[in-house]
Amino acid sequence: MNAKQKLHQAKLAKLTTLINQQFESGLPIREWCIQNNQSFHAYNYWKHLIKESMVDSVIPDIVPI
């Protein structure tokens, strides 16, 4: 794993922690974002990135035959 991949993994880990904190708070996403000085749109983008990375790690690329 090169430095760029390690940095990406570290960022995803941090974002996953934030998303877990929101979930565990029981607050609606907008309210949690306001209370934690986070952008609602950025939060949703992070969530999208994490979902994408999870799918990529579970489902291999389709290789044409």
Image (spheres, rainbow, N blue to C red):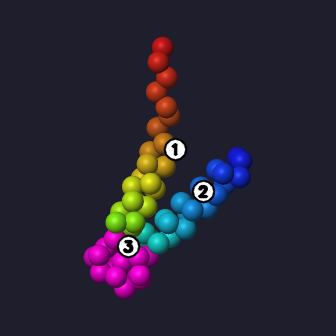
Give, as a three-letter code, the residue at label 1: Ser
**Visible in this render: residue 5?**
yes
Residue 26 sits inside the magenta stretch: yes
- For residue 32, which numbered disc appears in the image? none
Per the rendered image, the range of residues in magenta is 21-40
Label 3 SS: loop
Left or right: 14 in relation to 45: right
Along the line of sight, which residue is nearer the eye, 61 or 8?
8
**In the rendered image, which residue does mark 1 sit on?**
57
**Visible in this render: residue 24?**
no
Q: Work out which residue is located at the far top of the displayed protein and give it.
A: 65
Q: Earlier in the sequence, mark 3 or mark 1?
A: 3
Q: Position of residue 53 (x, y in %)?
A: 49, 49
Q: From the image, state whether disc 1 or disc 2 is nearer to you.
A: 2
Residue 37 sits inside the magenta stretch: yes
Left or right: 23 in relation to 65: left
Q: Is residue 40 above or below residue 10?
A: below
Label 2 SS: helix
Q: CA distance from mark 3 to mark 2?
A: 21 Å
**In the rendered image, which residue does mark 3 sit on?**
39
